[in-house]
Amino acid sequence: MSGTHWERQVAETAQRYQDMRNRVAQLSVTEVSRDGMVQVTVSASGHLTDLTLKERWRPTPATRIAVEIMQCVRRAQARIPDLLQQAMIETVGPRDPAAHLIVAEARERFPQPPELEPTPPAPRTGIAGGEDDWDGRPVMEDIQ
């Protein structure tokens, strides 16, 4: 192999890695909660880069909002490995060992989140079963 061919091959490989680095730096993933009230965006490194909370017509407990945010972040992060893999295939090729290691590490860091559980209904107030104890009589009765 001549020196010129080898140098050109090294330069091309370096350029492909630079292209991959640029593509990965631009990657982001956005996820929205089932009810559309929470939207998050994460970078290719999994960091939260944007958070949007829409107003609701009724108050929502802060703990429920926190759960929605974290579910969205985890779903967004879980999509990162596939996007990295696609960017790497398109820039350095499907056989590059370093690319395989990067994607494998991303899959470890950002596993698929557990299936979403149905959101529990809001706690009911009053008598168990949702019925009140009013029997139709006047509330204020003369006590004799």
Image: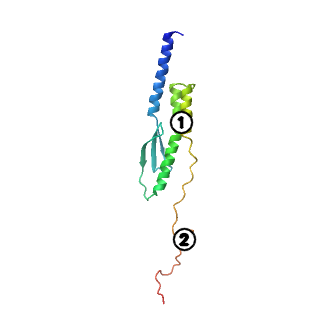
Residue type at mark 2 is Ile
In the displayed orientation, state which residue is furthest to the bottom.
144
Rendered view: 26 above or below 58: above
Total labels: the figure holds 2
Mark 1 surroundings within 10 Å by alpha-carbon count, few (fewer than 14), some (14 through 19), many (20 or more): many
Q: Position of residue 131 (x, y in %)?
A: 54, 71
Q: Position of residue 38 (x, y in %)?
A: 46, 49
Residue indicated by mark 1: 106
Residue drawn at x 48%, y 23% as measured from the top left: 16
The colour scheme applied to this rendered structure is rainbow
Label 1: which secondary element: helix
Residue type at mark 1 is Ala
In the displayed orientation, state which residue is furthest to the top.
2
Residue indicated by mark 2: 127
Q: Position of residue 107 (x, y in %)?
A: 56, 37
Q: Nearer the viewer, mark 2 or mark 1?
A: 1
Residue drawn at x 51%, y 48% as measured from the top left: 71
Disc number placed over residue 126 in the picture, else none? none
On the rendered image, what quadrant is the N terminus found in? top right
Mark 2 surroundings within 10 Å by alpha-carbon count, few (fewer than 14), some (14 through 19), many (20 or more): few
Q: Are marks 2 and 1 in contact (CB under 8 Å)?
A: no
> Which residue is at the front of the view, 56 or 85?
85
Residues under labels 2 and 1: Cα distance?
50 Å
Earlier sequence position, callout 2 versus callout 1: 1
Label 2: which secondary element: loop
Residue drawn at x 51%, y 37% as measured from the top left: 80
Residue drawn at x 46%, y 82% as measured from the top left: 140
Rendered view: 35 above or below 96: below
